[in-house]
Image: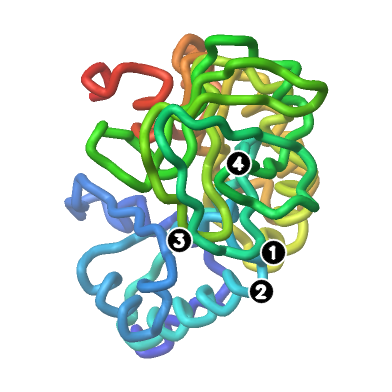
Amino acid sequence: MQSSHLLLEEPIRMASILKPSKASFFPAMTKIVGTLGPRSRSVEVLSGCLKAGMSVARFDFSWHDPEYHQETLENLKAAVKLTKKLCAVMLDTVGPELQVVNKSEKAISLEADATVILTPDEGQEASSNLLPINFDGLSKAVKKGDTIFIGQYLFTGSETTSVWLEVSEVQGNDVVCVIKNTATLTGALFTLHASQIRIELPTLSDKDKEVISSWGVKNKIDFLSLSYTRHAEDVRHAREFLSKQGDLYQTQIFAKIENIEGLNHFDEILQEADGIILSRGNLGIDLPPEKVS
């Protein structure tokens, strides 16, 4: 095969590029996984990433739809043709991620010591007094005094775009919280993390399964990043699902450790997964940041 004909469409498992092609070949010991977003999805930028050493492209399905990610992938294919550098594809699942929904995308100002209500009624408009969330079981999972984080990862205390809340009371399905720091939330979605609290949602959600069986199968993904892996059984369940999705029985699973529950079961998860991803952002919320190495 001539190198000029090295195209992504050819029947080759992209994960094979992570292994030496010859016994005498000494590969780079470090591989680069690049997360593709709004500023890293053009053919030009992707070509630069490939030339710089990106060998795996991560598609984060916690935001945007499959059509958007497909456009990015088509640009990646074009970049592969231009640079003649292969790149594996990683699908990152949403998992049991809690989110605040801000359909209007207007900036939301939150003032320290004020009160805000978290409600599962997503039909409500987000405001400084009311934040709709995508989970109706939060009121059953938390109690007075629990802490909830909303916004960016790894809160440092000096940021103004992330906020800590303290639960003051539960009213039916709503959770009333006291705002601990002044902040402004911007965008359509914000991550919500209830510190050290188990959320009764499946690790591989129905939405994840739908994306894998459609987008994942269509594009023959090489890696699955399994968000919020909490037990070895989560990995076994995901592998069983992949085994029924045609060529995806070859797809490798990287367990993403994002909370204390996953950390406590790290050894057994390691035995089942093909690799481990430590999400320092979320771990830095469940643990003191200085303990996240």
Closer-to-camera residue (184/12): 184
Mark 1 lies on a secondary structure that is helix
Q: Label 1 to label 2, Cα distance in Å?
A: 9 Å
Whichever of labels 3 and 4 marks the residue nearer the N terminus, that label is 3
Whichever of labels 4 and 2 marks the residue nearer the N terminus, that label is 2
| Residue under pointer 1 | 215
Closer-to-camera residue (115/31): 115
Viewer-side label of 4, 2? 4
| Residue under pointer 3 | 88
Which quarter of the image is occupied by the C terminus?
top left
Q: Label 3 to label 4, Cα distance in Å?
A: 44 Å
Q: Residue furthest front?
A: 114
Residues at discs 3 and 2 in contact (Cβ within 8 Å): no
Q: Tell me the residue at 66%/74% (across/down).
A: 67
Mark 2 lies on a secondary structure that is helix
Whichever of labels 1 and 4 marks the residue nearer the N terminus, that label is 4
- The amino acid at mark 1 is Trp
Residue 267 percent location from the top left of the image? 45, 12
Mark 4 lies on a secondary structure that is loop
Viewer-side label of 1, 2? 2
| Residue under pointer 4 | 129
Whichever of labels 3 and 2 marks the residue nearer the N terminus, that label is 2
Q: Tell me the residue at 76%/38% (across/down).
A: 120
- The amino acid at mark 4 is Asn
Viewer-side label of 1, 4? 4
Using a 10 Å C-alpha cutoff, classify the residue at mark 1 as few (fewer than 14 neighbours), some (14 to 19) or many (20 or more).
some
Decide if residue 65 is on the left or right side of residue 145.
right
Q: Tell me the residue at 35%/54% (across/down).
A: 33
Q: Label 4 to label 2, Cα distance in Å?
A: 34 Å
- The amino acid at mark 2 is Glu
| Residue under pointer 2 | 67
Which quarter of the image is occupied by the N terminus?
bottom left
